[in-house]
Image (tube, grey):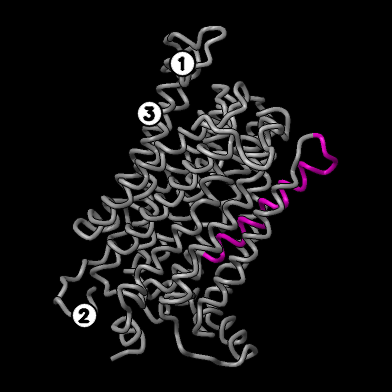
Amino acid sequence: MTASGTERNCTTSAGLAGWVLFDWAMQPYFTLVTTFVFAPYFATRLAGEPVAGQAWWGYATAAAGLVIAVLSPVLGALADASGRHKPWIAGFGAMMMVGACLLWFARPGHPGAVPLALGAFAVGTIGAEFATVFNNAMMPRLVSADRLGRLSGTGWAVGYVGGLVSLILVLGFVVTDAATGSTLAGLTPPFGWALHADAGARATGPIAAAWFALFVLPMFLFTPDSHQHPRTSEAIGAGLAGFAETVRDLRAIPGLGRFLIANMVYTDGLVALFAFGGIYGAGMFGWSAIELGLFGVLATVTGTIGAFAGGRLDDRFGSRAVIVAALAGLILTLGVILSTDPHHVAFVVPIAGRAAGDVSLYAGLGDKIFLIAGTIVGLLAGPLQASSRTQLARLVPAASSGRFFGLFALSGKLTSFLGPLAVGIVTHWCGDQRAGAAVLLGFLGVGMALAATVASPPVPVSDGSAASR
């Protein structure tokens, strides 16, 4: 029996639960900071103008993506050579927490607040993404190949639930409505935050950091890691050599190169879609923090449902079918979003907008259409992300998963700065948020076309052994 097989047989239910809880622990950073609360706050309050804010946020996302692109494959190969993944997860998790906590100091009107926010966001994002690389690399050692889809889908779904719970708590107890000074639950926020309308948004960074520190502990305590302990210098040399070997091995694994290119392209579009969803709603429809938060709740609920269902569809029909279907749905949904504004649908058909002085939630028809479309994006994004990671896990040898997941992160990040950068540039040049977001149709379409050419390996039939837990 291989070493990886031995480690897999030793994985207990607590170990699997600990691995799954990593997604629960990390997701609030992406939900609260990257998408639904801090990012719109940055664009509308800190930057002062949504178009400029969307452009600057795009540049910061692009810068973080470029760093991740350069370092991910080397670090993934180094993790395989060193054998252990948890120390890397701890180090990069700490990096995420530092960046997230610094967001608290990004107050409107303070000198340097904008570059501080952008720099802290970039640092936190780099830490979050690198920690995720090493967590993903543990997956093939935990379950047999016929269970990878379910494990991956469950992880994404639990992550979405973590984001949902954190968002509900923030809306209910922290973020205030500018008109009332109260939270969604009608409460006065703690620590005198009601006196500062931006305090709730700024607090999302430290909240995400504390959430991660608490809920990542079961992974460190119960999920098995490799027992190899080579010297650091040997691991670094072997890691660099492993990266070169990984690039050479691409030709030996049918379809792997094309899949990585496809993942590179459609992930560009998906990263930018997440990064600008909240900003788009705030700028195009003037949504308040409460409206953006409730939008995030609904999108997260549908994302959870999609990830659970997608994992099971993946094990039944294969990763490719789920990936292609999800991308096709995202393209259609993004088309609906781009064709809708507060006064038109399908670009030219007039609709009733929000009446003057109407402060009710999602008062206009355009608001409601965007709300529904956004929840569909959540429904489709979960299966797409879960099946992408499963497709790679099924294509590559389990013993080399770290270096290939590093390359997977590279394919997801090598040009991931191009999506946000393209949105930022087009938004800046055209002075139009909709024009900036329209470039994402190209990324999703090309990625879908490429992914359709890569067959999923046959899903093994479980023999009922312990390894198939």
Label 1 near label 2: C-beta < 8 Å?
A: no
Crowding around mark 2 (Cα neighbors within 10 Å: few <14, some 14 to 19, many 20+) is few
Residue 88, image x and y in percent? 57, 74
The residue carrying mark 1 is 363
Q: Nearer the viewer, residue 322 or 49?
A: 49
**Image quadrant for the C terminus?**
bottom left
Cα–Cα gap, marks 2 and 1: 54 Å
- Amino acid type at image mark 2: Ala
Question: Mainly helix, strand or loop, the magenta region?
Answer: helix
Report the residue at 35% width, 64% height from top.
255
Q: Residue at x 55, y 45 (%)?
A: 32
Between 129 and 452, the residue placed more toward the observer is 129
Q: What is the CA distance from the residue labelled 2 to the residue labelled 3? A: 43 Å
Q: Secondary structure at mark 2?
A: helix
Q: Which mark is residue 372?
A: 3
Can you give x and y, in whole percent of width and height, for residue 192 in the image?
A: 69, 38
Q: Quadrant of the N terminus?
A: bottom left
Magenta part of the chain: 109-131
Q: Relative to residue 60, is residue 367 drawn left or right?
A: left
Alpha carbon separation for disc pair 3 and 1: 14 Å
Quarter where residue 386 is shown: bottom left
Residue 61 vertical position relative to residue 150 in the rendered view, above or below: above
Task: Quickly name the residue at label 2.
Answer: 466
Q: Position of residue 121 (x, y in %)?
A: 66, 51
The answer to whether residue 55 shows anywhere in this view is no
Residue 430 in the image, given as x and y percentages of width and height: 65, 26
Q: Residues within 10 Å of mark 3 (few under 14, many from 20)?
A: some
Q: Nearer the viewer, mark 3 or mark 1?
A: 1
Which comes before the other along the chain, label 2 or label 3?
3
